Image: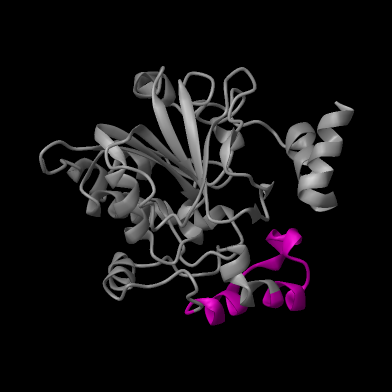
Amino acid sequence: MFKKILSKFKTKGISGLVRAVYSRVFAPHPNKASSFATLRKFFQNKTGMEIGGASAVFTEPGLFPIYPIALRVDNCNFGNRTVWEGVIEEGHTFQFDPKKFPGQQYIAEATDLEIIPSANYDFLLSSHVIEHIANPILALTEWVRILKDDGVLVLLLPHKDGTFDHRRPVTTMQHLIEDFNAGMAEDDLTHMPEIMALHDLERDPEAGDFGAFKSRSEKNFENRCFHHHVFDTHLAVSLVDYMGLQILAVEAIRPMHILVLAQKTVNGVLPANSAYLAGSAQYRRASPFKSDHL
């Protein structure tokens, strides 16, 4: 235990150590997503890629425990050091499960995975990453490319109602399309004025006071901390549908999660997602978030 604490301190500093202790000891473990039991077959003894992470939600106590049942999980992060993971080394260093051999660690932009062959993975995981990306459609284009036919995307992202984004308007699908058509790069600061005006610092104590938050945000290309776009469940569903994926499940889960699972279709088959896009969609009735019912 002492060695683990010392290692965490060396790689992530005192703030990272405090976050790790809090999440391990005090933070309540969420119940498993209701869709996990029926969809675990897509991950059992399969090989996947995670963008960002490692993520507690994919561990055994977590929301969608894929790590324990997967054959291997590789990882891609944008830099050799991040606010969340600390120091990252390329190679077979991604320790997704203590009982399994580490996966391959890549360092690359989520929007440019040219180092990874097409149709390479059975599944792709992303937990609270897409909101940090300036060009989500470009990122998803790459993620879908490296999935095999019938491969599955697990997209977990924050619902505005449960986060410091609750004062900001939900991004429109048209805005995401315009960012893609414009070739928006990851150094974009277009949303910074809105973030400075509407970000709820009381819900984001790690950001510090306004001065510290503004300074961090101005260096977003280095740290990737702020949320370019703001999601409710309908936008998440619309984005996945726009990518031509067949939606398998949608869940809105307290305290802040949107979970969308979708499958890559074969030979250009169009997805049939009308039930998920309808105003009467089941997720709207079941969602704990007020804005999903509007």
Asked if the magenta segment contains residue 117, the reply would be no
Question: Is residue 68 or residue 279 the one in the foreground?
Answer: 68
Q: Residue at x 21, y 41 (%)?
A: 275
| In the rendered image, the vertical position of residue 139 relative to residue 99, given as above or below | below
Q: Nearer the viewer, residue 232 or 74?
A: 74
What is the x, y in percent for residue 221?
56, 69
Q: Is residue 193 magenta?
A: yes
The image shows residue 40 at horizontal and vertical percentages of: 40, 21
Q: Which quarter of the rendered picture does the C terminus lie within?
A: bottom left
The residue sitting at 39% across, 58% down in the picture is 111
Which residue is painted at 55% across and 68% down in the image? 167
167 relative to 109 in the view: left or right:
right
The answer to whether residue 16 is seen in the rendering is no
**Residue 138 lies in quadrant:** bottom left
Question: Is most of the magenta stretch helix, strand or loop?
Answer: helix
> Number of callouts in the render?
0
Q: Say if residue 271 shows up in the picture.
A: yes
Q: Quadrant of residue 184?
A: bottom left
| Nearer to the camera, 183 or 25 | 183
For the record, the magenta segment spans: 190-215
- In this rendering, the answer to whether 28 lies above or below 132 is above
* Residue at x-position 41% and y-position 18%: 44
Q: How is the image coloured?
A: one colour
